[in-house]
Image (cartoon, helix red, strand yellow):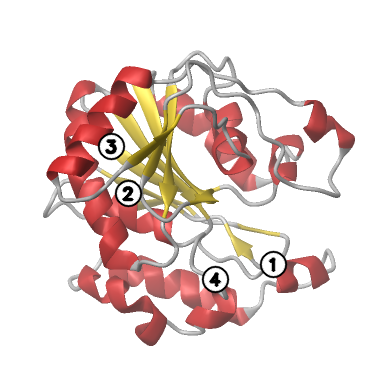
Amino acid sequence: MHFPSIFVSHGAPSLLLEPEQPAHQFLQELGADLGRPTAIVVISAHWEAATPTLTTAPRLETIHDFSGFDPALYAWRYAPRGAVAVSAWAHALLETAGFHPQVDPSRGIDHGAWVPLALMYPAADVPVAQLSVQSQHGPAHHQSLGQALRPLREEGVLILASGSLTHNLRAAFRWTPGEPTPPTVSAFSAWVADTLTGDQPGSLLDYEAQAPDAYWNHPTPEHFLPLFVAWGAGTPGVRPRRVHTSVTWGALAMDAYVFA
């Protein structure tokens, strides 16, 4: 079974409790559309490490790495089995590609991973391994990570990159329901879609200089970097598809892409 690599925007943890949100509905349908993978490797914006690091715990306990949200979210548990063998395989692939990966035998699963997974695979019956991002490195580094991990897809492993197409939290926290989406968000989202699915996708690697309002949409890069891992893991020469676009909290674009 050949699985794609996918980039999803996870938004705020409250997405789990908001069935009226288009992104909530999309993620619920996505798991059913994909079917059940043999395992999932999740690259989450909420795990930053100096070197690529993989979880190796036999079960990934739920990390509630947020504050100020509905108490129901702190009671939520999503604790899948650890994909230990897949983590070891990913480690070997990264070493072969010239990286210096590490392992973390005790880390659980953060909300950047379990929020989308709880909607996609609510039974938590698919083994999961997490991989960190390295925010001190740029898009090309993360694209290379994805390229190294591409062989996992051939054995039915889903590579799921979880971040946010835009991530200006200050603007999101100031947003009042009913206000329109800032044009800076719409322009950035459109530029990414046109670039990634167009004739010169390589321009995305230079998004900080070429994308409209890049710094406004990503004051820090960690929520955009997972996109490059999913892109790198895609099949060369096959154009990605934007399979969802919406906005939550006024400034968080929830776009998702499939890389076949």
Q: Are dots 1 and 2 in contact, CB under 8 Å? A: no
Q: Which residue is mark 3?
A: 4
Q: Name the secondary structure under disc 2.
A: helix
**Mark 4 or mark 3: which is in front?**
4
Q: Is residue 150 visible?
A: no
Instruction: Give the residue displayed 47% in from the left and 16% down from the top.
Output: 58
Instruction: Give the residue displayed 45% in from the left and 20% down from the top.
Output: 82
Q: Name the secondary structure under disc 1.
A: helix
| Left or right, residue 126 beside residue 239 | right
| Left or right, residue 61 beside residue 92 | right
Q: CA distance from mark 1 to mark 4?
A: 10 Å
Q: CA distance from mark 3 to mark 2?
A: 9 Å
Q: Please name the amino acid that badge 2 sits on.
A: Ala
- Where 36 sits versus 233, above or below? above
Q: CA distance from mark 1 to mark 3?
A: 30 Å
Q: Please name the amino acid that badge 1 sits on.
A: Leu
* Residue 230: numbered disc: 2
Q: Are dots 3 and 2 in contact, CB under 8 Å? A: no
Q: Please name the amino acid that badge 4 sits on.
A: Thr
**Mark 2 or mark 4: which is in front?**
4
Along the polypeptide, which appears first: circle 4 or circle 3? 3
Nearest the eye: 88 or 221: 88
Along the polypeptide, which appears first: circle 1 or circle 2? 1
Q: CA distance from mark 1 to mark 2?
A: 23 Å
User: Quick one: label 3, few (<14), some, or many (20+) residues within 10 Å?
Assistant: many
Along the polypeptide, which appears first: circle 3 or circle 2? 3
Q: Are dots 2 and 4 in contact, CB under 8 Å? A: no
Nearest the eye: 192 or 132: 132
Q: Which residue is mark 4?
A: 220
Q: Please name the amino acid that badge 3 sits on.
A: Pro
